[in-house]
Image (tube, rainbow, N blue to C red):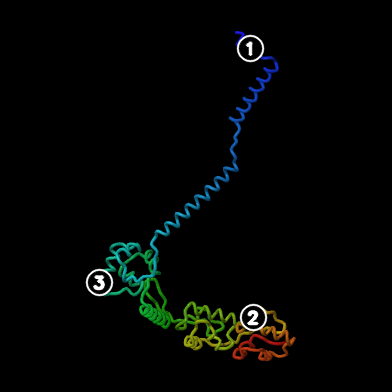
Amino acid sequence: MKIFKSHFWYNKHQRNGVFFLLFIIIVLQLIYVYVDFSSEEAQGVSKKELIAFQNTVDSLKRIELDKRKPKLYPFNPNYITDFKGYQLGMSLEEIDRLHNYRKQNKWINSVKDFKQVTKVPDSLLDKVAPYFKFPDWVNARNKRKTKKLLEARLKSGYKAGNKKSTYLKPTLSTSDINKATQKDFEFVSGIGEVLSSRIVKYRGKLQGYLLPEQLYEVWGLDKETANRVLQTFAIVEKPTIKKVNVNTARFKEVLKNPYIDYKLCKKIFEYRDEVAELQDISELRNIKDFPLNKYDRIILYLEAK
């Protein structure tokens, strides 16, 4: 008994030490159980990284799927095989209609022909039609047909109705080339939306057509078509042009002149600095390499005061 008693007999200081040690152990256990040591900031960063990683994976998947999709290149619809038709999304019946048509030694020469022969839905036609490639002579013939049809409709005043076609006499809002609208110019044979837009845009740049010959300067407008425009429209009222004083104008103001490019504008200002002031606008002729063929047009917009 003495042996065991010697192991369990403590003095006051030793007992206090044991109790203090037990207190620390209990406190640490409570902290471990009830205190959350997880870091919200770290979790937040992990979530952001996870989302970014998932987005990267998804984008790589989409790229891979796009690579697997068969790419469309320009092709002649007359030579569509069974496999090609399947890739395009055509049904067996639609492919057979095309092959039967070709067996009769007949050719598809337009998107309209392809639609009539195969009877494909418009949704599929809109996807594949941009890739149709016909011979150059077929395209040229189709353009001639379209042009003749448009000219015939314009002459007769064609206007599409719901079921039937009615014909109205075309009318112009004005015969003044400086007041005509874009639609007015489209009445002229050979003038479409693009050319009529350029005519109106260039007119704004000129502040109005002062000379009939200025119409020939419209980009893409050939002389024959321009002559037809001048047969329909004329300069009834000459526009009022706000001339720029070459002695006081800034560089950008002179550069706005439709007949002056950057190089010529620089020469004009160098000459102005040399002579201090132009006494007459005709002094522009003294500039080295001045385009004399454009002089009459340039002075329509410049003056020297």
| Residue 58 position within the rendered picture, expressed as x and y whole percent measured from the top left | 47, 53
- Pair 2/1: label in front: 1
The type of residue carrying mark 3 is Lys
- The alpha-carbon separation of the residues under discs 3 and 2 comes to 64 Å
- The alpha-carbon separation of the residues under discs 2 and 1 comes to 113 Å
The type of residue carrying mark 1 is Ser
Residue in front for this viewpoint, 150 or 111: 111
Q: Is residue 291 left or right of residue 122?
A: right
Residue farthest to the top? 1
| Residue 130 position within the rendered picture, expressed as x and y whole percent measured from the top left | 40, 69
Q: Which mark is residue 6?
A: 1
Residue in front for this viewpoint, 130 or 155: 130
- Label 1 element class: helix
Residue in front for this viewpoint, 301 or 265: 265
Badge 2, how many Cα within 10 Å: few under 14, some, many 20+?
some
| Residue 102 position within the rendered picture, expressed as x and y whole percent measured from the top left | 27, 72
Q: Which residue is mark 2?
A: 255
Q: Which mark is residue 211?
A: none
Determine the image quadrant of residue 37. top right
Split into 4 quadrants, where in the image is the N terminus?
top right
Circle nearer the N terminus (3, 2) = 3
Position of 38 relative to 165 (above/below): above
Circle nearer the N terminus (2, 1) = 1
Determine the image quadrant of residue 70. bottom left
Split into 4 quadrants, where in the image is the C terminus?
bottom right
